[in-house]
Structure formats: structure tokens, C-alpha cells
Image (spheres, grey):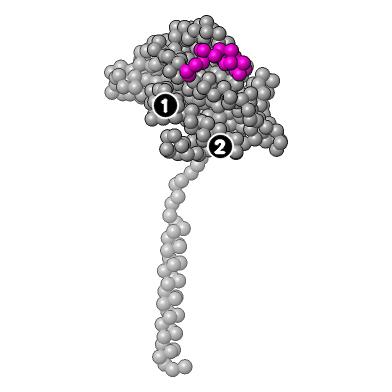
């Protein structure tokens, strides 16, 4: 080995030795860096709720931090309670207590110096076309019909499809009962369930708990297992768009051309009008009534909840469903059930009474249902 190679080899060895010393020094320094992080105390107990607080006596405490505000009001359950003034403490927290609230699901929001605000301490929010309200639930000793219980549970599916008449992609929510998973041969009837104005295809199961209600009904033998299809009933994002003759016609075409074929392709569905129902709330109730009566070859069960379009004093049934009143015997022979309901505290209640009376006077068989409730 010549002198040049010996020099190069010794130089490389020296450089490696120096690098090792540097790395060892850095590791030694890293080992003495203080670490003050600890998880002790993080999970010593459950987080306390700031707002709303539901007490054992069914009272509810609402709070909101608004140090600079001059006036804060609570709007609770819309129709049952007027706006109520909150009181401010010394650190800028406003609060109010409602006593002896009946078990139920309630919407609420605040007015802070006239500005509508949700309860930012409460993650339970009703959404649809907009952020609508905060939600609070008062439970009872015995589970109510909409409360999750220890029964067989089904599955929520979200499908995407192209709306031919509206020329855009939309979402569709489908509920299949627990019994659907237990067999590969059984076919199930279908309820096409339409939402109200301001809502979307998710509200029936997120807020209305349609799946939970049906599961409880099936478990108690008050309903047969069925598939529930929850479409989006908006055409342009407005109530009027989903209630005009043109809008309902587009939604009718969408249902028949796009939605029903998709559902019957993807799921084990019992076909024929006797196995299809259509129902809806408010705006969706008007859609269900009109589409159902215009398609008696496809639907034998029609339900209209909380009135809506049909209660309008200017509503003309012949403009939406021509000829229905002239063929009452045919309508009655094809419908297994026409069901209409409205709360007595709803501003639509007089219109509901007039409309259902008009149907009966024209020989249309319909069942009516009412209770002391508002538009809910």
C-alpha cells in the first residue's frame, strides 16, 4: 500500500471518530433535556357541563358567556314559551332556570342584544339548510318512543345519485331494519319519507330519530320491518321551491325516474303500490300528498304531517292533483290509507281542519289526527 492510500485511510478513520464523538455528545445532551409533560390529573373526573344542565327534577339551567352584552333572552321550544330574560352575574355569565320541563326533545337559542345565537357550549345542534337551533333533551324514568333502547338495531346507508330533472348530484339516506341482515331472500316494503322546509335528507334520522322510533315500534310489534328512504326535498334551497307546482313536479320525476329505481336495484324491496308508502312533514307533507295522489299506481299509503302547503288558504288541489276530487271512488279503492295530522297550536291548524273537511265532503276517505302541539 503506497503512502497516499495510507494517508487517505487514516484520514477517513479520524473523521469517523470525530463524527462518533459529536453524536455521542448530542445524545448525552438530549438525555438531560427536561420533560415536564404529564397526563396526571387530566382524567380525574367527568367534565362538568356549562350549558344546558338538566337536573333530576326536570329543571334546565341555560348559561351563556356574554360579558359586554346589555340584554340576553332565551327562546325555548318556540311556541310554548315566550322570550325569557336571562340574568347576568359579576363575571359576565348570563343564566336562567326553567322548572318542571316535561320529558321531550326541545330546540332553543339565545338573543344576545337582538342577535340570534346558538349555545356554543352545547354540541347538539339541529342543522339543515342552515344552523337552526341548539337541542336539549329531558328524559324520563321509562324510555320514550324516540329514545334509543336495547332492541335490535338497523343500519343507515348514504347513497349518491344524479338527479335527472335537477341536473345535479344529490344524497339519499336509506334505513334498513335489523331483520334485513338476517336473511338474503326476504323482501321489505318501503316508506319514502320527506323532510320539511329548511331541513335536508339527514334530519329525519339525526333529529327526528325516525330509525330509532321504527326500531322501537318493530320491537313492540306495533310496526312491521320496513325500509325507509329519506331523500332531499329541495329544488333551489327554499321552501317555495319545494312547494311550487313546478318544484313538486321536478321532485316527482326525480323520485320515479332516479330514486325508486336506485333503491329497488340496491336493496331487497317488495314492489307494487301496496308495498310503497309516501309521507312527509310540512313542506315534505305537501310533496307526499301531491305525489302520492298523482301516482296511485305506485303508492297505496300516503301520510301528511303538520300540514303546511295544504293549509294555505290559497291552495288549490286541482292545480296540484287535477281530477282527484272528481274520482273519489277510484282514489278510495286504490289507497289503503290517507292520513293527515296537525297540532292544535300550529298556525296551520284552521287550514288543516278546512282541508280535511273538504276532502271528506268530496267523498275522499282520510284519517285525521291532532294533538296539543305546535309545528313539530
Where disc 2 sits, the SS reads: helix
Q: Nearer the viewer, residue 178 or 274?
A: 274
State the residue at coordinates (62%, 16%): 333
Residue 158 location (% of width, % of height): 53, 36
Cβ atoms under marks 2 and 1 closer than 8 Å: no
- Residue 326 location in percent, x, y? 51, 12
Q: Which residue is mark 2?
A: 262
> 253 or 279: nearer the eye?
253
Residue wearing tag 1:
247
**Position in image of residue 299 (x %, y %):** 58, 23
Q: Is residue 130 visible?
A: no
* Quadrant assignment, res 331: top right
The CA distance from mark 2 to mark 1 is 21 Å
Label 2 crowd (10 A; few <14 / some 14-19 / many >=20): some
| Magenta region | 321-338
Q: Is residue 5 above or below residue 236?
A: below
Check disc 1 and report its element: helix, strand or loop: helix
Amino acid at each position: 500500500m503506497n503512502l497516499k492510500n495510507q494517508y487517505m485511510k487514516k484520514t477517513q478513520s479520524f473523521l469517523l471518530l470525530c463524527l462518533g464523538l459529536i453524536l455521542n455528545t448530542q445524545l448525552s445532551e438530549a438525555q438531560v433535556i427536561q420533560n415536564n409533560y404529564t397526563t396526571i390529573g387530566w382524567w380525574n373526573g367527568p367534565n362538568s357541563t356549562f350549558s344546558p344542565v338538566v337536573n333530576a327534577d326536570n329543571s334546565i339551567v341555560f348559561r351563556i358567556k356574554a360579558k359586554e352584552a346589555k340584554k340576553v333572552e332565551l327562546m325555548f321550544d318556540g311556541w310554548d314559551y315566550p322570550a325569557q330574560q336571562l340574568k347576568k352575574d359579576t363575571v359576565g355569565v348570563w343564566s336562567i332556570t326553567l322548572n318542571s320541563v316535561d320529558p321531550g326533545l326541545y330546540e332553543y337559542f339565545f338573543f344576545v342584544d337582538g342577535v340570534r345565537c346558538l349555545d356554543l357550549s352545547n354540541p347538539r345542534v339541529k342543522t339543515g339548510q342552515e344552523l337552526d337551533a341548539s337541542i336539549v333533551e329531558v328524559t324520563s324514568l321509562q324510555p320514550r318512543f324516540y329514545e334509543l333502547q336495547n332492541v335490535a338495531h338497523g343500519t343507515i346507508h348514504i347513497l349518491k345519485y344524479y338527479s335527472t330533472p335537477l341536473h345535479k348530484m344529490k344524497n339519499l339516506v336509506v334505513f334498513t331494519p335489523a331483520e334485513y341482515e338476517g336473511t338474503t331472500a326476504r323482501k321489505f316494503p318501503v316508506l319514502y319519507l320527506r323532510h320539511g322546509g329548511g331541513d335536508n335528507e339527514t334530519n329525519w334520522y339525526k333529529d327526528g330519530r325516525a330509525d330509532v322510533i321504527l326500531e322501537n315500534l318493530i320491537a313492540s310489534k306495533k310496526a312491521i320491518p320496513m325500509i325507509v328512504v329519506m331523500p332531499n326535498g329541495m329544488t333551489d334551497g327554499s321552501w317555495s321551491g319545494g312547494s311550487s307546482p313546478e318544484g313538486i313536479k321536478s321532485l316527482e320525476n326525480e323520485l320515479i325516474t332516479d330514486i325508486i329505481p336506485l333503491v329497488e336495484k340496491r336493496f331487497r324491496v317488495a314492489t307494487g303500490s301496496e308495498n310503497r308508502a309516501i309521507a312527509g312533514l310540512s313542506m315534505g307533507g305537501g310533496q307526499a300528498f301531491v305525489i302520492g295522489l298523482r301516482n296511485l299506481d305506485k303508492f297505496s299509503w300516503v301520510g301528511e304531517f303538520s300540514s303546511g302547503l295544504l293549509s294555505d288558504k290559497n291552495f288549490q288541489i286541482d292545480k296540484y292533483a287535477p281530477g282527484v276530487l272528481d274520482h273519489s271512488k277510484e282514489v278510495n279503492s286504490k289507497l289503503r290509507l290517507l292520513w293527515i295530522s296537525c297540532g292544535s297550536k300550529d298556525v296551520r291548524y284552521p287550514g288543516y281542519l278546512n282541508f280535511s273537511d273538504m276532502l271528506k265532503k268530496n267523498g275522499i276517505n282520510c284519517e285525521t289526527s291532532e294533538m296539543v302541539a305546535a309545528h313539530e
